[in-house]
Image (cartoon, rainbow, N blue to C red):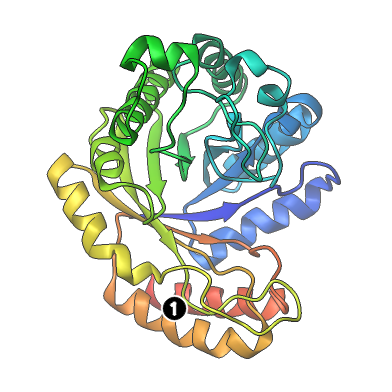
Amino acid sequence: MIVTAYCLAHGHWTVIPHQLEENFKDMVDCGFTAVALSFSESEMMYSRRAFEIQVNLAHKCGLKVFVIPSRLGCRFAGAPLMPGLWISGHPEAQVPEYTGWTGPIACLESDVFRCWIKEFMDTLLNDYPLDGIIWDEPKSDTMVSKHPATIAKYGSSPTPEQMADGFVDFLDDLTSYCLTIRPDLCITLFNMASASTRFTQAATAIKGIQYAGYDGNLSRHSFFHEKPEWTKYRIESVWERTQQECAAAGKGTFALIENMLIPKEAMQEYKDNLDTYLQQYRPDHLSLYYYAHNNEDPETVHQITRELMQKYL
């Protein structure tokens, strides 16, 4: 079983190496065996040394290091929560007339975009001794593109089903390319339950992906002082789907517990539900956020996570 500390936008600008090392040692003490670190275009431009420091310190502390390629072409999740830098400046690779809140989004049939993202991953995988990749929530799997490259491939009226198939083709091609650079990479994919089953079933079966599954929460969320609500599905609700898709594809199961955005009044339910979850479920690759973002009392959430991980893992 792999147990991964999920870290988004961690230590990329204000970098204090001894504090980072303390974090990695604390992860090991909790029971984590790996750490997942986000890497966006911002890090590629301004935080290359910071990322190298993190990778080296994590390995020094005995953790494997997975990278989360974030917000690339606005086709993956991760951090930061902002439009993709490259795609914003390359209209020739954008889905025409897309007006989503994340800004422009890449057309997956565009050779220009495919070439750029491969160059991005080439640099990332050649410059750092990474142990694996986590593809974080592929986005807009059924969104129809009328880009010239899409029309050339599918005809004048592409369907949502063809878009899902095209996303699988893109992810298959990208995963295969990464493995030509580093054949020993451990690659994990996770989706949102709102993604089409056509996409998630086929993507799970992609050669080279070893673990697949979903993220989900265990408590109500609150972004600031508003009343807490269930803003996402429970992680247990996608376990049967995870098992079915992974069994059909011969892959290991994955789950990411989103222990973030928790107000004080929801901490007890997080504790109770995490206790129950760790008793009953054993994904082959389990991930929990490490000091997840925007919790009202981060230390208490972390202490709950630590105690229950040490109890069950």
For this rendering, which residue is in front, 56 or 105? 105
Residue positioned most to the front? 156
Locate residue 313, reporting x and y percent: 39, 69
Tell me the SS state at disc 1: helix
For this rendering, which residue is in front, 24 or 96? 96
Say above or below: 201 vs 84: below
Locate residue 278, reporting x and y percent: 36, 74
Question: Going by the image, does 295 lie left or right of 33?
Answer: right
Locate residue 135, reporting x and y percent: 46, 39
Locate residue 279, reporting x and y percent: 31, 79
Q: Residue at x 67, y 42 (%)?
A: 57
For this rendering, which residue is in front, 148 or 123? 148
Q: Residue at x 23, y 35 (%)?
A: 205
Q: Residue at x 70, y 29 (%)?
A: 41
Q: Which residue is mark 1?
A: 274
Crowd class of label 1 (few under 14; some 14 to 19; many from 20; radius 10 Å): many
- Amino acid at dot 1: Leu
Question: Going by the image, does 87 lie left or right of 36?
Answer: right
Question: Going by the image, does 102 lie left or right of 244?
Answer: right
Question: Going by the image, does 126 lie left or right of 189?
Answer: right
Quarter assignment of residue 74: top right
Quadrant including the N terminus: bottom left
Q: Residue at x 31, y 63 (%)?
A: 238
